[in-house]
Amino acid sequence: MRFDAVLFDCDGVLVDSEPITNGLLRDMLEESGWVMSAEECFRVFVGKAVRDERANIEARTGMPLTDAWMAEFYARRNAALNERLTAVEHVHGAVERVHAHHQGRIACASGADRFKVNLQLDKVGLSPYFEGRIFSGHEMPRSKPAPDVYLAAADFLQVDPRRCAVVEDTVTGVTAGVAAGATVLAYLPAQTLHDSRDALLAAGAVQVFRSMAELPALLGC
């Protein structure tokens, strides 16, 4: 496969953040009255902004999702990420090779808030590859599974979205990439609570791969 640009999701693709953030979210929701397993929390929230599940949270806890609760979540989340975040295995070599092959025409298009994305890329040393080309779903009219963040990244790179590859790891993200008109490759490591291979393919991914070491070859780099 040959593409003019490559657009990466962040959480679960570049950084192994989702066990950290979803674990904290599960704990805080339990404190508020919604008790669920780690697996259920992943199923409900992975790939989505917490605020997008406001109605569900309020129905399960019987309390409003306040700005104060969200501020506490962000503060505790950021502290946990600062302490425990690691990069996805083999991602540095993969990103370096893809960046070089495409002469810098890569971007990070995340559903997360910009502060979190910047914190994470800085923490694992990937920021230089994406400097000036980071896009947050929080700053778009619609977040994933809508295609807005991927369309914004492609527009900035002056590349037709149909000539872009998107690297994702959730059905929500795959749906967003497909809606943008891009070709989506789905990362699914062996140890994961994420969506299944069949679900990722059903959402429109053209390829499911197990290791970031495989990615450059899949992209023709």
Image (cartoon, rainbow, N blue to C red):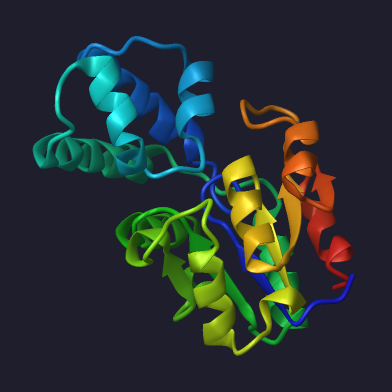
Q: Is residue 24 above or below residue 17?
A: above
Name the residue at 54% across, 42% down.
Answer: 16
Q: Position of residue 23 (x, y in %)?
A: 40, 25
Q: Where is residue 159 in the image (x, y as percent from the top left)?
A: 66, 86
Asked whether residue 126 is in view, the answer is: no
Seen from the viewer's position, the closer of residues 123 and 21 is: 21
Residue 176 position by quadrant: bottom right
Name the residue at 74% across, 75% down.
Answer: 162
Quarter holding the N terminus is bottom right
Looking at the image, how many numbered discs can be counted on the residues? 0
Looking at the image, which residue sits at the far left?
68
Quarter holding the C terminus is bottom right
Name the residue at 27% across, 20% down.
Answer: 59
Q: Where is residue 118 in the image (x, y as percent from the top left)?
A: 38, 63
Residue 198 position by quadrant: top right
With 105 as the anchor, is 1 left or right in this view?
right
Q: Is residue 131 above or below residue 118?
A: below
With 169 as the anchor, is 44 left or right in this view?
left
Seen from the viewer's position, the closer of residues 62 and 2 is: 62
Q: In this view, does 60 lie above or below 146?
A: above
Name the residue at 16% across, 42% down.
Answer: 71
Seen from the viewer's position, the closer of residues 145 and 39 is: 145
Asked whether residue 186 is in view, the answer is: yes
Q: Position of residue 11 (x, y in %)?
A: 52, 48
Q: Is residue 216 above or below residue 54?
A: below
